[in-house]
Amino acid sequence: MKLRIIKVSSALCLLYYFFIVAFGGFSLSWSWLWLLASLFFGFFALILTLDNKKPFLCKIPKAVILVPTLIIIMGMLCFEVLFSLVLSESGKKADNGADYVVVLGAKTTDGYMPRILKYRLDAALLYAEDNPDCMVIVSGGKGNDEEKPEAEVMKEYLLKQGLAENRIITEDKSRNTDENLSFSKKLIEEISPEGKENRIVIITNTFHVYRAVSLAKAKGMENVEGYAAKSRIEADYHYSVRECIGLMKELVFGNIGFKDLIH
C-alpha cells in the first residue's frame, strides 16, 4: 500500500508538470519543481521496490534512517502550515476607504501584459471606482528581458480603461515584491502629510496576497490589507505551492518575522 501511494504521487507530480507546461509553457517559473517532486517520489519507490525483492534497509542502522525521515516529516508539516496560511487570504476582499491602492507588477513581454497582471489591474479599477478618493500606485520596474518598466505598461492599461491620470502614481524601479512594497511605501511617505495614518490596500493575485501583506507589515505598514484579484486557475495550485517556498525564503533571509505572519 505504501509503495503504491508513493508511485501514484510520482505519477501525479509528473502529470501536473505537463499540465501546467501545456498552459504556461516551459518558461513558467518554478515549473521544474514538479519534475523534481516526481523524481523524489520515484527514487523512494525504487528503493522500496528493490528492498521488497532483496531486503537491505533492515541492515542500515535505525539512526541513519530516522534522522532524514524526521527532517522530511518536519519539512512537510511546515509546508502544510504555510500552505494553509497562503490559502487563508486567497479570497480576501479589502474594505472600502483606503487612501492608497498598491498594484504589484508582473513580468511583461514586448509590452504584452500577462493575464495575472490584467486581473490585478481590473481589480484595482473596481476598487478605484468604489473609492474615488484613493490613489493607485502601479509598482514594477524594467527587467533585463523587458522592453519597458512594468509600471508603464500598467499605467497605459489603466488610462485606456478610463482611470484619470492624476489618480495614478508610478513606481518603476522595483525588481521584486520586496522592493515593490519598499519603494511604494517611500512614495506614500513623500506624498502624504506628515503624521497622517494612511490606509493601504495591496492588490495581487489569490496565491500572492498572504506573502505580500506579510512583507508590508514587516516594513512598518500597519494599516494594510490585501485584495485578492483572480488568478490563472490552471496553475493556481502551482503558484500557491511556490508561495510556500517564497515564505520560507523570506523567513530565512529575515525579510519577515514570525510576528508578521499574524494578519
Image (tube, rainbow, N blue to C red):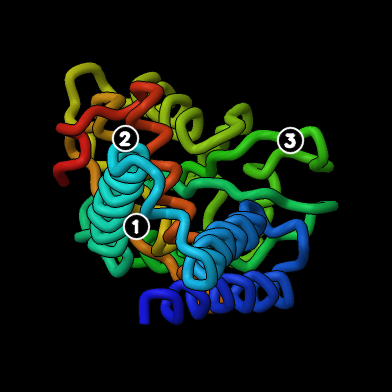
Residues packed near mark 2 inside 10 Å, few (<14), some (14 to 19) or many (20 plus): many
Figure check: 143 above or below 112: above
Element carrying mark 3: loop
The residue nearer to you, when weighing 148 against 12, is: 12
Q: Is residue 174 left or right of residue 129?
A: right
Front position among marks 2 and 1: 2
Q: Which residue is mark 3?
A: 143
Question: Where does residue 67 sit, x and y in percent of width and height?
Answer: 31, 38
Element carrying mark 1: loop
Instruction: Say whether marks 2 and 3 touch (CB < 8 Å).
Output: no
Which mark is on residue 132?
1
Residues packed near mark 1 inside 10 Å, few (<14), some (14 to 19) or many (20 plus): few
- At x 30%, y 25%, the residue is 219
Looking at the rendering, in which quadrant would you find the N terminus? bottom left
Specify the amino acid type for callout 2.
Ala
Instruction: Say whether marks 2 and 1 touch (CB < 8 Å).
Output: no
Figure check: 98 above or below 95: above
Front position among marks 3 and 1: 3
Asked whether residue 213 is in view, the answer is no
The residue nearer to you, when weighing 238 against 69, is: 69
Question: Where does residue 10 sit, x and y in percent of width and height?
Answer: 55, 71
Question: Where does residue 87 sit, x and y in percent of width and height?
Answer: 29, 64
Q: Which residue is mark 2?
A: 216
Asked whether residue 142 is in view, the answer is yes
Residues packed near mark 3 inside 10 Å, few (<14), some (14 to 19) or many (20 plus): some
Cα separation, mark 2 vs mark 3, equals 22 Å
The residue nearer to you, when weighing 111 against 188, is: 111
Specify the amino acid type for callout 1.
Pro
Element carrying mark 2: helix
Figure check: 194 above or below 242: above
Specify the amino acid type for callout 3.
Gly
- At x 50%, y 46%, the residue is 104
